[in-house]
Image (cartoon, rainbow, N blue to C red):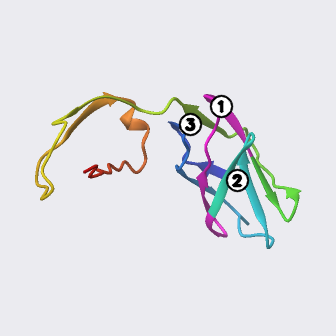
Amino acid sequence: MLQSQNTTLRPISGGTDVTLYGTDLDAGSEVHVSFGEVDCEVLSRKDNQLVCRMGASDSQGGRQLRIDFDGSRGRVPYPVTYNFALNPRISTILPAKSIVAGGVQIDVKGEGFALLQRPRMVLINDR
């Protein structure tokens, strides 16, 4: 039985780890977790905790939790909603160029960065 969760507003691109707390969350040999039509890939589970990684959504808005154990719907005593929001937007990156050796601070400005659970920046050398 589900008792609590750590879901908040997150980007539609997915990739957010969701932790569900309850009892008997390790029941059965197969478990499927989804929020609406969006699957949440189970990463780990034990009796009182299940962690899954959200897939991407095609739109904003709330999705209701569904959890199935061996094909049977699990008990969720109250509605659990996962809320998808637009992905963060970058408005400027300064400086626009850097040196290969690194060590240069890069400032990224925009909005919605608080939605990210594990922000990462990848720089590509396009020479």
Left or right: where 40 falls relative to 86: right
Of residues 61 and 120, the one drawn nearer to the viewer in this rendering:
120
Q: Residue at x 65, y 34 (%)?
A: 58
Labels 3 and 2 touching (C-beta < 8 A): no
- For label 1, the residue is 62
Badge 3 or badge 2: first in the primary sequence: 2
Q: Of the numbered discs in the image, which one, if any, rests on residue 2?
A: 2
- Alpha-carbon neighbours of circle 3 within 10 Å: few (<14), some, or many (≥20)? many
* Callout 1: SS: strand
Of residues 108 and 95, the one drawn nearer to the viewer in this rendering:
95
Indicate the quadrant where residue 81 lies.
top right
- Alpha-carbon neighbours of circle 2 within 10 Å: few (<14), some, or many (≥20)? many
Indicate the quadrant where residue 33 lies.
bottom right
Q: Nearer the viewer, mark 3 or mark 2?
A: 3
User: Residue 14, image x and y in percent?
Assistant: 56, 45
Left or right: where 3 falls relative to 108: right
Q: Nearer the viewer, mark 2 or mark 1?
A: 1
Instruction: Say which amino acid is labelled 2.
Output: Leu
Whole-number angstrom distance, CA of label 3 to CA of label 1: 11 Å
Of residues 28 and 99, the one drawn nearer to the viewer in this rendering:
99
Q: Of the numbered discs in the image, which one, if any, rests on residue 117?
A: none
Q: Residue at x 88, y 58 (%)?
A: 72
The span picked out in magenta is: 43-65
Labels 3 and 1 touching (C-beta < 8 A): no
Which corner quadrant holds the N terminus? bottom right
Please identify the dominant SS of the magenta region: strand
Instruction: Say which amino acid is labelled 3.
Output: Ile
User: Residue 61, image x and y in percent?
Assistant: 63, 28
Q: Nearer the viewer, mark 3 or mark 1?
A: 3
* Callout 2: SS: strand
Reply yes or no: does residue 127 show up in magenta: no
- For label 3, the residue is 12
